[in-house]
Image: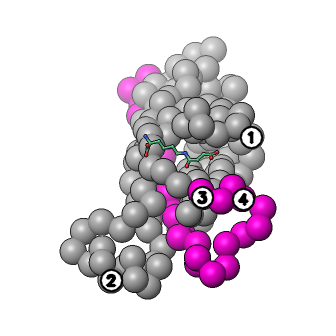
Amino acid sequence: NKRVRGISIFRPFVFGSVAHPFDPENKPADCPPDHTHRWQIFVRGINGEDISYWLKKVQFKLHETYAQNVRTIEQPPFEVSETGWGEFEIQLKLFFAPESGEKAQTLWHSLKLHPYGPDAEGMKERRDTVVSQNYEEIIFNEPVEAFYEILTGG
Ligand code: SLL
């Protein structure tokens, strides 16, 4: 499997979390009483771009307080939706198209449930959504030819 020499291909994406505090008068019946928030962790393309031609699987490793804390998502949307009470570090492992021969890459995200920054108090009162996301780029250096074709749509 020959590599395309002298070529680097960049693919951008966004990963992070959104969290919504429950309305105390209106908590979902199906979740434990100590849970305070619903949240999602995700990996997605910029502006909804489909990234499933190069990203094949994402493994999200949640805190051990969660049942089956390793969640494997094999097609878009690459996201996990949960409820909980606490913030913690989530490990994300990105797996690429099998043709690529590339090793999985690991990223970390700090799940944020509580507002922070100058308007934190106002946000808390309004029960605003807390968003914490990062732009990231993955670089494929000298991809093998089959993967180069996939990446460039050739
Ligand atoms: C903390 N170090 O103490 C963190 C741990 C754990 C979060 C946070 C509930 C899980 C469940 C949950 O939110 N765990 O009940 O299934 O803040």
Residue at image x 53%, y 70%?
A: 21
Which residue, given by chain and number where applicable, does mark 2 sit on? 122
* Dot 2 amino acid type: Gly
Q: CA distance from mark 2 to mark 4?
A: 27 Å
Residue 43 x/y as whole percent: 56, 50
* Figure check: 9 above or below 40: above
Q: Nearer the viewer, mark 1 or mark 2?
A: 2
* Lower sequence index among marks 3 and 1: 3
Disc 3 packing (10 Å; few <14; some 14–19; many ≥20):
some
Q: Nearer the viewer, mark 1 or mark 4?
A: 4
Q: CA distance from mark 3 to mark 4?
A: 7 Å
Which residue, given by chain and number where applicable, does mark 4 sit on? 31
Q: Is residue 112 left or right of residue 38?
A: left
Which circle marks residue 74 in the picture? 1
Q: Residue furthest front?
A: 33
Residue 70 x/y as whole percent: 66, 33
Please tell me whether mark 1 sits on a helix, a strand or a loop.
Answer: loop
* Dot 1 amino acid type: Glu
Please tell me whether mark 2 sits on a helix, a strand or a loop.
Answer: helix
* Lower sequence index among marks 2 and 3: 3
Which circle marks residue 35 in the picture? 3
Q: Which contiguous range is marked in magenta?
A: 5-34
Residue 53 x/y as whole percent: 67, 44
